[in-house]
Image (tube, rainbow, N blue to C red):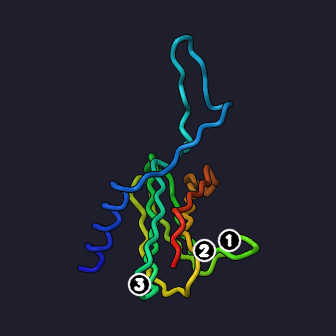
Amino acid sequence: MKKFVCIGILVLMSLFSTVPAYAADNGIQNTGSQTVITPQFTYISFLIPGLSINSSGKASCSGMTSTYNSSHTTKLTIELQKSSASGWGTIKSWSATGPGPNTIDIYKEYYVAHGTYRVCATAKVYNAYGTLLESQSVCSSTVIY
């Protein structure tokens, strides 16, 4: 039952969260009157991090990803990071691996002390021979507790 609730929460988070998309100048091609923007991800269909912290300090950390190709394998890692004077430091991380194009999701809880936090999700896509094809990271918005 808990797994179904977690999956439901992740689906809702994916529907109502936004992931910024960035295009570099070299990714834009001018074809006369139309401009074509190439995608940021080549093998990854989506990559969504999530973070919420309740009033007791329980951080709900999540990540979800999928690939386009069924012959590829994806490793998803999420890192709970805390901000300090020297930058962001990882305090906890979790990983899961699965075949494409299945959705890989991670949902974990971890109690935190007061501070500023974010979750960074990293997806790595490998072909059938174990060669790394793509590695991308996306970080959630910061949450202050």
Of labels 1 and 3, earlier in sequence is 3
Residues 18 and 41: in front is 18
Of labels 3 and 2, earlier in sequence is 3
Residue at image mark 2? 81
Residues 55 and 93: in front is 55
Looking at the rendered structure, the kind of residue marked 2 is: Gln
Tell me residue 96's x, y (percent). Answer: 49, 70
Residues 63 and 101: in front is 63
Residue 80 against residue 133 in the figure, above or below: below
Label 3 crowd bin: few (<14), some (14–19), many (20+), radius 10 Å: few
Could you tell me if the residues under marks 3 and 2 are in contact, i.e. CB atoms within 8 Å?
A: no
Q: Quadrant of residue 113?
A: bottom right
Looking at the rendered structure, the kind of residue marked 1 is: Trp
Residue at image mark 1? 88
Residue 55, disc: 3
Number of the front mark, 3 or 2: 3
Tell me residue 132's x, y (percent). Answer: 64, 54
Could you tell me if the residues under marks 1 and 2 are in contact, i.e. CB atoms within 8 Å?
A: yes
- Rounded to the nearest angstrom, the CA distance separating label 1 from label 3 is 22 Å
